[in-house]
Amino acid sequence: MNLDMTEMRKIAPSEIEASNSVGSQFGVSGLIHDNDFMYWFDYDNSKNKDESLASVRYMLEGRGLAHFFKDHIIQHSPSRNNFSLLDFASGYGRVSRWMKEALPGTQIFASDVHQDAISFMSSIGVEAFKSSSVPEEFTPPCQFDVILSVSFFTHMPKPTWSRWLKRLEKCLNPGGLLVITTHGDPIWHAMGSPRPDEDGFYFTSGYSEQKDISVTEYGTTYTSLEFVVARAREAGLRVEGIRSPGHGNHDIITLRKADRSMYPSAFSPPTMLTFLKNKFRKRIIR
């Protein structure tokens, strides 16, 4: 994995002034790191190149996501009131910086593979630690009641997709929630309905908004519900909720770590898998 930025770009001072103005309204830092790929992705794909609008969008969309997932998490009842939350694959804190504002009293952590992202988030008041490109080498300082992973499993190739799901399950406290986003049917149709493999998985290395990571390791991924449910079952996670689409074109999958012996029927029984499998086959044959 190559984590050196291929092109150093500088965010204009006027933009930082605008983002600081937004942040100051809520007691949140408005600084944006020059290497923040999510900022540049939005800026480069915007029809309106007014720079101040890009930084304001960055801040407001981050806040919107934090509050959206706050509501989603509360609906699924974390295992305890004063729960801990990890924003996994957090990037440079677009969402992480807002989680304390959205969930006061919650212990918030963030983790990313980029060391400069960790240093930056620490400088703006987010408790952050470095992740790993190898799932089995991911060793957080503690376990968590909730792990949120937005736009991560939407980019993983098949060799690491299931391994990361299993690794994150190990990082949950008993009864903990794992909330992930995936690319399901809405994205599949937008991609031109490419033919997935027999498990319901499709990966293309042709595109990634992260320019410093090889597209063979971080591309664009489609996963059928059948694939996601089966992998969750293998990882020892109970499927608690599926929203398709959930946010934008992303599906939201809510999983809970639970004792199999106590909830044997909740771990995606064969009848559910058979139903999803038949539904999936009908879609790709059409």
Image (cartoon, helix red, strand yellow):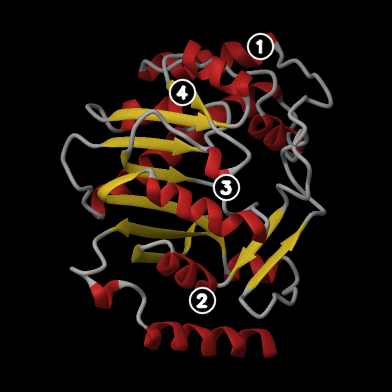
Could you tell me which residue is drawn at 69 percent across and 67 percent down?
Answer: 202
Could you tell me which residue is drawn at 26 percent across and 67 percent down?
Answer: 260
Whole-percent x, y for residue 190 in the image? 69, 66
Specify the amino acid type for callout 3. Phe
Going from N to C along the chain, the mark reached first, 4 or 1, is 1
The Cα atoms of the two marked residues, 2 and 3, are separated by 19 Å
Judge depth for marks 4 and 1 and give the one in front. 4
Q: How crowded is mark 3: few (under 14 residues within 10 Å), some or many (20 or more)?
A: some
The Cα atoms of the two marked residues, 4 and 2, are separated by 34 Å
Could you tell me which residue is drawn at 44 percent across and 67 percent down?
Answer: 234
Specify the amino acid type for callout 4. Ala
Going from N to C along the chain, the mark reached first, 3 or 1, is 1
Q: Which residue is under mark 1?
A: 14
User: Which secondary structure lies at badge 4?
Assistant: strand
Asked if the residues shown at circle 4 and circle 3 are in contact, with their CB atoms under 8 angstroms apart, the answer is no
- Vertical order, 125 against 95 (above or below): above
Going from N to C along the chain, the mark reached first, 4 or 2, is 4
Whole-percent x, y for residue 68 in the image? 38, 45
Q: How crowded is mark 4: few (under 14 residues within 10 Å), some or many (20 or more)?
A: many
Q: Which residue is under mark 3?
A: 152
Going from N to C along the chain, the mark reached first, 1 or 2, is 1
Going from N to C along the chain, the mark reached first, 4 or 3, is 4
Specify the amino acid type for callout 2. Glu
Disc sitting over residue 244 in the figure: none
User: Which secondary structure lies at badge 3?
Assistant: loop
Going from N to C along the chain, the mark reached first, 2 or 3, is 3
Q: How crowded is mark 2: few (under 14 residues within 10 Å), some or many (20 or more)?
A: many
Whole-percent x, y for residue 179 in the image? 40, 52
Q: Which residue is under mark 4?
A: 128
